[in-house]
Image (spheres, rainbow, N blue to C red):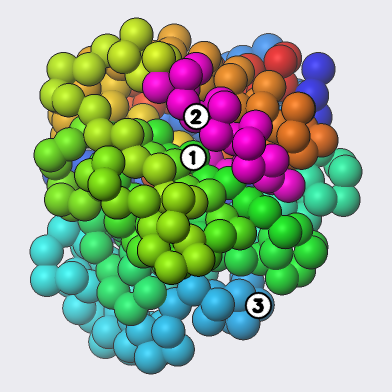
Amino acid sequence: MAKTAYLFDTIYLEHDTGPFHPECPERLSAIHAKLKKADFYPELIRVSAASPDMKYLEMVHTREYIASTRRDIERGVESLDGGDTIVCTRSYKVALMAVGGCLKTCDVIMKGDAQRGFCAVRPPGHHAERNYAGGFCIFNNVAITAKYLQARHGLERVAIVDWDVHHGNGTQHIFESDESVLYISLHQYPFYPGSGSEYEKGKDLGQGFTMNFPMRSGSTDKDYLAVFQKSIAPALDKFRPDMILVSAGFDAHQADQLSSIRLTSGVYREFARILAESADRNCEGRIMAVLEGGYNLDALSNSVAGVIETFVRG
């Protein structure tokens, strides 16, 4: 059994995206309800939301973007990008608490109270760029977490594996010139947001530390597992990170309405197993997943439960 931290807080339900929006509060409610019925639930180390030190946000997002986001939300704008990043008057506070909860979960892991963690937060983050929102994302939770691990806990190398069906343009762009962060993404391509070709490998000192694996529409468990086994696991072993972060989106599931990849719930267990084994080899078992997409409630809750159970039992 591996000690596993689980971040969930009802404040994350207060980010109200209105009726019919896929990134809805019910996503987290479904996950939490599923987990509470699991026999491993009592073993989880519960973590609640927290306010972050703003200096860590400013390592990723510009001060101007943070201020304008707060101002726009508090004056009642309906979206931040003029499109699908819908907000309510509570969204700025909730987004901050999502970041703070992830950093708090890092502290639990770095203190040794847990080896692994799963952060059930919203809004998601991997589309958020340094100075603008997009794709349902306000602040880049995983990118801020990586910077925090380096600045607060002194880690030298952090790996981010992004298995969301959409390419994490924000995370890639934030770290594309940074050789201390390895960003790996598999995603449907061509697809939103349009980035993530195999030729995007980073630049300057970060050349080679961005790895994109574009997946064709209709790709299956077998296709994804081949990439994990033949490419991702060896790349992590070569990089030898001090911690692995996962942008854990579940919208590549065959039941999800926002993509045309054909993954099953069970394959996410295999993703978690492969990455947890890599963490055991390379970074004392330290791995933390942060929720990104996933919009079919049954597929999402079943898949998340499988990942967390794998973390606990594996």
Report if the CB atoms under discs 1 and 3 are less than 8 Å apart.
Answer: no
Question: Is residue 240 part of the magenta span, yes or no?
Answer: yes
Label 1 – label 3 distance at C-alpha: 25 Å
Residue on which the image places disc 3? 53
In what element is the residue under mark 2?
helix
> Given contact means CB atoms under 8 Å apart, are the residues at marks 3 and 2 in contact?
no
Residue hosting label 1: 161
Quick one: quadrant of the C terminus?
top right
Indicate the amino acid at tag 1.
Val
Q: Nearer the viewer, residue 125 or 235?
A: 235
Task: Report the residue at 16% width, 58% height from top.
Answer: 84
Q: What residue is shown with label 2?
A: 232
**Residue 140 appears in the rendering:** no
Residue 25, given in percent of the width and then of the height, sits at 36, 46
Q: Describe the element under mark 3 as helix, strand or loop.
A: loop
Camera-side mark, 1 or 3: 1
Residue 302 lies in quadrant: top left
Say whether disc 1 or disc 3 marks the residue closer to the N-terminus.
3
Classify 109 as above or below 150: above
> What is the magenta range?
227-246
The quadrant in which residue 20 appears is top left
Residue 56, x across and y down, in percent: 61, 75
| Mark 3 or mark 2: whose residue is earlier in sequence | 3
